[in-house]
Amino acid sequence: MKVLIVYKSKTNFTKSYAEIIAGAAGAALMDAKDVTVERMSEYQIVVFGGGLYAGMINGLKQAKEMFEASEAKELVVFATGGTPNEAETVIEEMWKTNLSEEELSNVAHYYMQSGICYEKMKLPEKLLMKMMAAVMDKKKEKDELENGFAQAIKNSYDISSEVYAEPLIQYLKNRMEQKCEESI
């Protein structure tokens, strides 16, 4: 079974996770800007990864359109962002924003906390993040999650870990094993 890992990364967090996943799963790796429908059609499973920007997964809409036009059989999605994995409600809402109800049921999807890199952001993105930080700072009554978020978006940081990629890597290994067993 051939697996393709496609990533769209502005600050290299998603690219780093894509490299980890591709290496561990023995999959091909490609930057989204280099992918075509024809190339995607050469693979049975396509894994798309993108960073979160204002709650939206960067490049997901285009990746889904390309997947639909391809002959690939299965789409898997992963997102990276500065939100801690423990913020399950926030992550669940993000998935509801990015995937339809049907996709939520049929498309395997994974979130991997990463970080924020102001040094690689464009000026409008930096300003938006800094404005969010200022608004959160001024909020009088914050719960623990809001307080953590306010502190987290003030500066660049990296909380990435290979451990966060393990569930997706295991999923791919299981799918490849299934396919091998089916062909025996």
Image (tube, grey):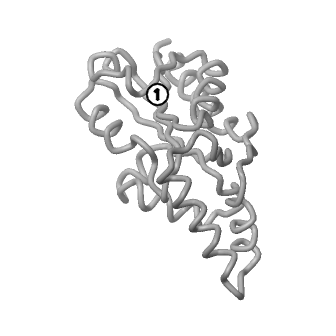
Categorize mark 1 by other alpha carbons within 10 Å: few (<14), some (14-19), many (20+): many
How many labels were placed on the picture?
A: 1
Foreground residue, 102 or 39?
Answer: 39
Q: Nearer the viewer, residue 73 or 117?
A: 117
> Which amino acid type corresponds to the residue marked 1 in the rendered image?
Val
Disc 1 secondary structure class = strand
Disc 1: which residue: 6
Q: Is residue 35 above or below residue 138?
A: above
Q: Looking at this view, is 56 or 26 the one in front? A: 56
Q: Please tell me which residue is depicted at 67% across the width and 63% down the height of the picture.
A: 87
Above or below: residue 115 compared with residue 101:
above
Quarter-of-image position of residue 40: top left
Q: Quadrant of residue 120?
A: top right
* Residue 138 falls left or right of residue 163: left
The residue most toward the left is 69
Most distant residue in the bottom direction? 141
Measured from the top left, where is residue 51 in percent x and y? Answer: 53, 44
* Residue 17 position within the rendered picture, expressed as x and y whole percent measured from the top left: 63, 32
Residue depicted at x 62% and y 37% = 13
